[in-house]
DNA sequence: AGAATTTCTCCACTATAGGAAACAAATGTT
DNA sequence: AACATTTGTTTCCTATAGTGGAGAAATTCT
């Protein structure tokens, strides 16, 4: 970088005004039902100092904030979060267990994971293959791209156009070109649960 | 709690002397190859102030530290805790449980899955994050691309640059832009096992 | 309701954080 | 080697962080 770089004031990190920090601390303290006095004693700081911090009338030292986060069981990273970020992309999408978009038939369950994000390239989903059933019928499944699969539970046999069948059980994983005809057969008495991540090319 | 609680000095959070903070900041700055002057300009603080902070001759305000962590891509929670470790590379095809290429340290285990295939785009691996530990160090993990993660067992908190921390447990999944600074903290008593699938762009 | 008590805010003071500039050390150049 | 330049440290000063105590505002208790 050049030595005469000068960042416009409003884009500098100093834009943060500290109200968020103040509120977090007050909320955390009150959540514990503690008074300024008590909290101060435990953290080793004065009650007046804490009062000013919570009212955003001071710019506390890092050390003071560190003690408070410890004593109040606070989540530090949260304090560093910028409310109005710009630049770098930050997309994220998460799915709690069993909350994904479902698709199911008598023999097969398909739960899409993380499908709120529009511009993602991989498609993750969890499939449950009913005991003694197949995920492919008379024809091979075949689609341009690559797939990764991880067996969460149960046992199954992966069959494909160019290789011998592979017996997989919980903990095993497989990566293959999905343009190669393939399919799965559940081989045990229990249902097989598989995590797939598909990538189209 | 009673109002006359008095914590022995050596047990109080103030025991922290700040050397750790000083070193983290100097390390992060030097890792970027920046000078005090440059860093100060970008963060909006003076080079003398930064010098004093790095030499632990001052007790910087929280706001100053916040700006520094931001411009130096540092991982804030690290400043409140302790520990450390590293990254990945490789390929394959079909992996039986526990047969992948391993990489491990005292606090983190990393098993590459399916790494025989040369021309694959996704990189799947399983990581075990030891109880109460972190997968990220003083800086955010950040690399061009996208990542999908699925929690196999245990509990952890996913922290990232632009969002609030997410608490995840077995069965939960997450998809994110890996260009966004991120990291994980194992939050339960048991180790957390996570399946990751990474896609570079 | 008013009194007693607890909890917080405001003031006055001291210690120190943070910045500008002088200084020193290291590095590059001729 | 001497000079120039760049990077880090120290000094000095001002603004303010942090504190104890006084006062205000709630809160609780007769």
Image (cartoon, coloured by chain):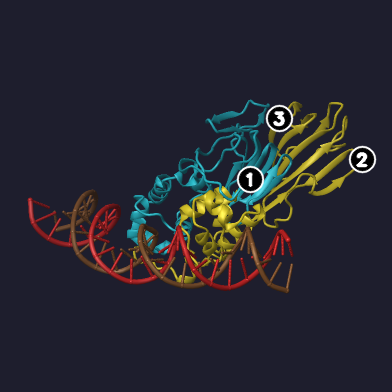
Chain colours: A yellow, B cyan, C brown, D red
Q: Is residue D14 left or right of residue B86?
A: left
Front-lying residue, A119 or B25: B25
- Place of residue B35 in the rendered image (x, y in percent of width and height, measured from the top left): 34, 55
Q: Is residue A187 visible?
A: yes
Q: Secondary structure at mark 2?
A: loop
- Give the label on residue A106, or none: 2
Which residue shows up at 58% across the image and 29% down it? B101
Which of the two discs, 2 and 1, sits closer to the camera? 1
- Place of residue B83 in the rendered image (x, y in percent of width and height, measured from the top left): 50, 38
User: Few, some or many C-alpha atoms within 10 Å of disc 1 (few <14, some 14-19, many ≥20)?
Assistant: some
Q: Is residue A182 visible?
A: no
Q: Is residue A189 left or right of residue B91?
A: right
- Place of residue B107 in the rendered image (x, y in percent of width and height, measured from the top left): 55, 33
Q: Secondary structure at mark 1?
A: strand
For the residues bearing labels 3 and 2, Cβ distance under 8 angstroms? no
Which of the two discs, 3 and 2, sits closer to the camera? 3
B75 up-or-down from A58: above or below: above
- Give the label on residue A64, or none: none
Q: Is residue A55 left or right of residue B149?
A: left
**Mark 3 — on which chain does it sit?**
A
Q: Tag 2 or tag 3, which sits nearer the N-term?
A: 2
Asked if both marks, 2 and 1, belong to the same chain, the answer given is no
Q: Is residue A98 left or right of residue A20?
A: right
Residue holding disc 1: B157
**Mark 1 — on which chain does it sit?**
B
- Separation of disc 3 and disc 2 at Cα? 25 Å
Residue holding disc 3: A171
Front-lying residue, A196 or A101: A101
């Amino acid at each position: 970088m050049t030595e005469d770089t000068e960042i416009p004031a409003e884009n500098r990190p100093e834009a943060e005004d500290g109200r968020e920090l103040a509120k977090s601390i007050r909320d955390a303290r009150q959540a514990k039902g503690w008074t300024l006095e008590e909290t101060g004693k435990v953290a080793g700081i004065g009650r007046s100092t804490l009062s000013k911090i919570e009212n955003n009338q001071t710019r506390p030292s890092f050390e003071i904030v560190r003690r408070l986060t410890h004593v109040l069981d606070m989540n530090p990273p949260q304090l560093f979060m910028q409310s109005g970020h710009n630049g770098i992309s930050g997309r994220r999408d998460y799915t709690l267990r069993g909350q994904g978009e479902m698709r199911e038939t008598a023999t097969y369950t398909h739960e899409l994971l993380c499908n709120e994000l529009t511009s993602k390239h991989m498609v993750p989903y969890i499939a449950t293959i009913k005991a003694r059933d197949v995920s492919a019928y008379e024809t091979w499944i075949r689609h341009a791209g690559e797939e990764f699969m991880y067996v969460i539970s149960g046992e199954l046999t992966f069959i494909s156009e160019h290789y011998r069948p592979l017996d997989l059980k919980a903990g095993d994983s497989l990566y293959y070109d999905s343009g190669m005809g393939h399919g799965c057969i559940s081989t045990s008495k229990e249902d097989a649960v598989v995590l797939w991540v598909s990538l189209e090319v």
